[in-house]
Image (cartoon, grey):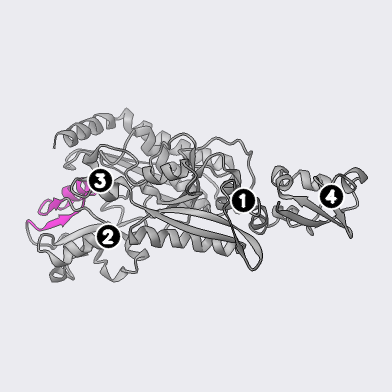
Amino acid sequence: MGSFICPAPASVGPALRQGPPSLCLRLMGLIILPTWLCAALPLRTSLARLGFGAQCPIAAATADPITAFPLVSASLDPEGGQKEENGSMMRVIRVGTRKSQLARIQTDTVVAMLKTLYPGIQFEIIAMSTTGDKILDTALSKIGEKSLFTKELENALEKNEVDLVVHSLKDVPTILPPGFTIGAICKRENPCDAVVFHPKFIGKTLETLPEKSAVGTSSLRRVAQLQRKFPHLEFKSIRGNLNTRLRKLDELQEFSAIILAVAGLQRMGWQNRVGQILHPEECMYAVGQGALAVEVRAKDQDILDLVGVLHDPETLLRCIAERAFLRHLEGGCSVPVAVHTVMKDGQLYLTGGVWSLDGSDSMQETMQATIQVPVQQEDGPEDDPQLVGITARNIPRGAQLAAENLGISLASLLLNKGAKNILDVARQLNDVR
């Protein structure tokens, strides 16, 4: 059984100091608490009542939660997730990911952050293919299945084959299967789209490409927005991971350019391939684009605590608003929906839009809400319900609700103005194409 050794405070009564060995041991002025008891104690309250001060690593969590959780993580894994190193047992956290190079880089990034925070834990990466990785001859919007890039990873979570999984947030549906939650949303990178040109068109822009140039993308959102702005171009579907799509661009003569996410190119170290960045006034981005999400089992409290410190408050609030907007519209990859969010001077600005498939009909609106980004994270009730699939107990609940309400309000505004008809027609046309 793992344990913590803490200086015994004077306020701890004789019964506890001299209690049975199964509860604690008194040894030269020290109290040894079994980890099951430590995990059961609410950190901020119970330990303070017992009299443990900053000298206790658990009580110190109120000042620095990051340093406390490596100790909590010494509890035994029900599946025996521990390995011996230098004569001591290390807990092993199994991290699920897709097999693509980009997915592995993203997962390595998250694991590197966790290793820095928890040097006493070993992280094991388990890679697997998803439905979206396997079906490459059909546009994503035509496959007709949600969770294209998350289902197999969630199956592994459900079977306790992994303890957490790393996703691109834009791939995660706004409604998760029962028993799962997003336990962390990391700091967002550039959420915009980029144009990567064929070598013979380096120096061009979408506007200056020759008439009838083929531009590759399988995103209905991108096609709807760009087709309206650049009617001289032809947009064609292109599938595969980033490596495959870039190879198709460079080696074949089929495409003059392809559209990719800036964040993905940056993570791969391919910034030099960015020929043009599409700013929101040209092409608004996908909900959650540029952010990484960590999905866990909703009841796995110690894993939730472990990954929760990765939440970036501003990214979290922006993405809650975006996901609430998409959920209330009942949108997805089968309809063109896009967003743009900005946090400035305590105000969260959300712009959202819907388009017909050819971009000829569209509707966009902007709303704002007062939301102070929390400077200091605060603990929330442990039974907090999820918001759009996200659990963030260390971010003020009021700020999260304000962000969610902003997304719902903007979606309601668009629906009241006729957005549902645009989306319904887009779904029908996508089904028959």
Q: Residue at x 41, y 59 (%)?
A: 106
Rendering coords of residue 228 (x, y %): 17, 47
Of the numbered discs 4 and 3, the one sitting upstream in the chain is 4
Q: Nearer the viewer, mark 2 or mark 3?
A: 2
Q: Is residue 233 above or below residue 367?
A: below
Residue occupied by mark 3: 221
Of the numbered discs 1 and 4, the one sitting upstream in the chain is 4
Q: Residue at x 49, y 60 (%)?
A: 111
Q: Residue furthest left?
A: 211
Part of the protein shown in magenta: 212-236
Residue occupied by mark 2: 242
Q: Is 415 situated left or right of 394 in this image?
A: left
Residue occupied by mark 4: 51
- Assess disc 3: are there few (<14), some (14-19) or many (≥20) residues with their C-alpha within 10 Å of its C-alpha: many
Task: Estimate the spatial distance between the alpha carbons at disc 1 and disc 4, rounded to whole Å.
Answer: 24 Å
Q: Nearer the viewer, mark 1 or mark 2?
A: 2
Does 228 appear in magenta?
yes
Of the numbered discs 1 and 2, the one sitting upstream in the chain is 2
Give the structural element (helix, strand or loop) at label 4: loop
